[in-house]
Image: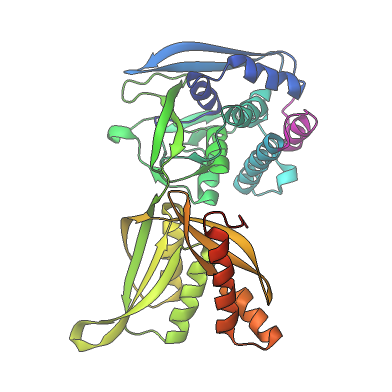
Amino acid sequence: MGGASGDMVLGSLVDCGLPIDILRSVVSALGIEGVELSAAPGTRGAVSGTHVRVLVERDDERRHSIADFVEMVQRSGLPGPVVASATGIFNRLGRAEAEVHGVEPEEVHLHELGSLDTVVDVTCAVAGLSELGVEAVYSSAIPTGSGVVRTAHGATPVPAPATLALLTSAGAPIAPPPGGVQDAGEMVTPTGAALLTGLATFEQPEMTVDVSGYGLGTRDPAAYPNALGLWIGSETTGRSSLVLLETNIDDESPQVLAYAIERLLALGAKDAWLAQAQMKKGRMGQVLSALVTPALEGRAADLIMRETTTLGVRSSRVRRHEAGREQVIVQTRFGPVPVKVKKLVGVAIDASPEYEVARRIALEKRVPLREVLAAARQAARRSIEPGGPSG
């Protein structure tokens, strides 16, 4: 990523094949007059792509508020998911500006972000992704840029306070300017940060790429290509990239370690566990491990250090091969029981009853738990056999 702004996101969409007229129809739906969208091919360094410009006439009468933007989108008649996503991004922008200025979100007075190109950038980006059939967005670490930028508040450090607030609130990973550039300038604008933090998961999935494109920024620095890359394709099923967190502990109570595991699972860890290990000086201790997505790595490591006595957490990237899964309801003589069906290459090969439901039924019916589990497994086997019920 060589930067991100609203215009660059639109440029990447058009470079991937989105007709510019689709974006123009979004502007019309917003009921905004005097806005012209243009798209032109160009280069930034050795990168070829598309530069989209949003030209707004006579937008200097007043600065618009977040509430104005939300109202425009909600009365536009655009599809519900587009309206909901754009509204969420505007509210994210409002909260960031409120945090920076120490006021309530409804008291925020927008300056650069109050122009109509902000509502056009955000709404067109969300609608464009929907039009291209994009169901999930992933992003690399965000380059911070360096130096200062001139704003209505005067000289402002890069990244701008609103940009930094957005990245902080999302726990987004950041990266230094490319090549150690000392004065890279503003590489990510608040609008670009709002779009990325509002839409993306910060990890790289395994995928096959069908089409790629680049949205070009207005600046053309010699030190790096000011371009935002967009790859569109399909995620590779069956494998995922995860982070394994581990720490050795020999001075913590079992109750605290059990609580830490509960917290990790509640945070969203794929799994968390303890294993006994012999520590230095012959002491017995525990290895606390957690398997998390890259997006959760920082928060999970912080949780482990806050909730236990450990002074450090090891992390390593791992690959996990995953079976497909589907939950179905099977009918047994004890009543309906949800069952998790395991699939390989789309074929069901095994099924496991949901323990908590089976336990509740066993207590209510006053029958052995193993009988409820056996009945559910038998019903599940019938449902996944060729020619059996589909669930």
When asked about the image quadrant of residue 76, the answer is: top right
User: Residue 172 vs residue 250: left or right?
Assistant: right
In percent of width and height, residue 120 lies at: 65, 25
Q: Is residue 195 above or below residue 124?
A: below
Q: Is residue 290 above or below residue 142?
A: below
Which residue is most to the right?
A: 75
Residue at 74% over, 31% down: 73
> 35 or 62, which is in the foreground?
35
Q: Is residue 162 visible?
A: no
User: Does the stretch in magenta take in 65?
Assistant: yes
When asked about the image quadrant of residue 199, the answer is: top right
Which residue is most to the left?
A: 281
User: Does the stretch in magenta take in 364?
Assistant: no
> 330 or 251, which is in the foreground?
330
Q: Is residue 227 visible?
A: yes
Position of the N terminus, as image quadrant, is top left
Residue at 31% over, 18% down: 46
Q: How is the image coloured?
A: rainbow
In percent of width and height, residue 143 lies at: 40, 37
User: Residue 160 vs residue 322: left or right?
Assistant: right
Q: Which residues are magenta?
A: 62-80
